[in-house]
Image (spheres, rainbow, N blue to C red):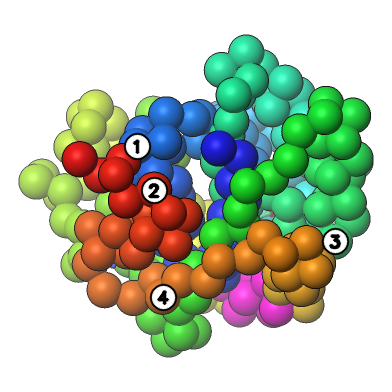
Amino acid sequence: MRIVLVGPPGAGKGTQATRLAEKLRVPHISTGDLFRANISQQTELGKLAKSYMDAGNLVPDEVTIAMAKDRMEQADAENGFLLDGFPRNVSQAEALDELLKTEGIKLDAVLDLEAPEEEVVKRIAGRRICRNDSAHVFHVSYKKPAKEGVCDVCGGELYQRDDDSEATVRTRLEVYHTQTEPIIDYYKVQGLVVTIEAMGPVDEVTQRALKALKREDDDK
Ligand code: ADP
Ligand code: AMP
């Protein structure tokens, strides 16, 4: 399956993507995680991306699209992928359509995670991620690690993302409403959007997502 996940920052896209990717047996491709890996490896792309990310703004389309394309063209993504955080504006959605057209493939669904603003702000404020792998995500109240500050998965150090500060979160939400939300209408025209409620326990949200994608049998 080829799926795009959309929703405000903190809605739980990364959390759900990890679980859905495993059940659907496709790679989870997060452009935010790819940028963070570049930052920790101190690449030129990482240096460029960091200034935009720390301000809560989008990294320019040209480099973002090239990075996403490169990742989607890797062998493990041949039979499907779950895109998390890409596309994030209409130009990126158009670029993705072009790329898919060239390859003769289509998206199966755009899964839209809905959550009220006060909830996503709480989720972001308490989010802690692992230095070794930003896909290892915890929360100070909702998903406490067994040992404070230590990743349950790999023992890495947990830290708060620079862009999860209160001031940056406001910009990110604004950017989401003005630049990212329009892609939902873009994909509605293509009949691809399935919307689910992202409130409630993580497992329940996963169930809802699988049901919406008509893949309940994958949860066996
Ligand atoms: P996104 O990728 O959309 O920015 P994350 O998956 O990183 O969001 O989730 C943001 C924070 O909220 C994380 O700390 C995560 O542990 C927590 N979280 C995710 N889903 C839920 C949920 N259903 N209930 C409570 N907390 C959640
Ligand atoms: P995320 O991990 O999805 O919350 O993304 C963190 C930050 O990375 C965003 O606030 C942007 O600065 C940057 N980013 C991630 N994906 C994209 C994208 N598709 N286009 C532009 N910037 C992105």
> Do the numbered discs 4 and 3 sit on residues whose CB atoms are within 8 Å?
no
Q: Is residue 216 magenta?
A: no
Tell me the mark number nearer the camera, choosing from 4 and 3: 4
Chain-order first, disc 4 or disc 3: 3
Amino acid type of disc 2?
A: Arg
Q: Secondary structure at mark 3?
A: helix
The span shown in magenta is 169-177
Disc 3 residue lies near ligand 2 with CB under 8 A: no
- The residue that disc 2 covers is 215
* Residue where numbered disc 4 is placed: 197
Decide which of tag 4 and tag 1 comes sooner along the chain.
Answer: 1
Could you tell whether 137 is left or right of 173 in the image? left
Q: Residues within 10 Å of mark 3 (few under 14, many from 20)?
A: some
Does the image show residue 123?
yes
Q: Which mark is residue 23?
A: 1
Label 4: few (<14), some (14–19) or many (≥20) C-alpha neighbours in 10 Å? some
Q: The disc labelled 4 sits on which kind of residue?
A: Glu
For mark 4, give the secondary structure.
strand
Residue occupied by mark 3: 90
Quadrant of the image where one finds ligand 1: bottom left
Q: CA distance from mark 4 to mark 1?
A: 20 Å
Quick one: label 1 or label 2, which is nearer the N terminus?
Answer: 1
Above or below for 171 versus 64: below
Q: Amino acid at mark 1?
A: Lys
- Name the mark nearer the viewer: 4 or 2: 2
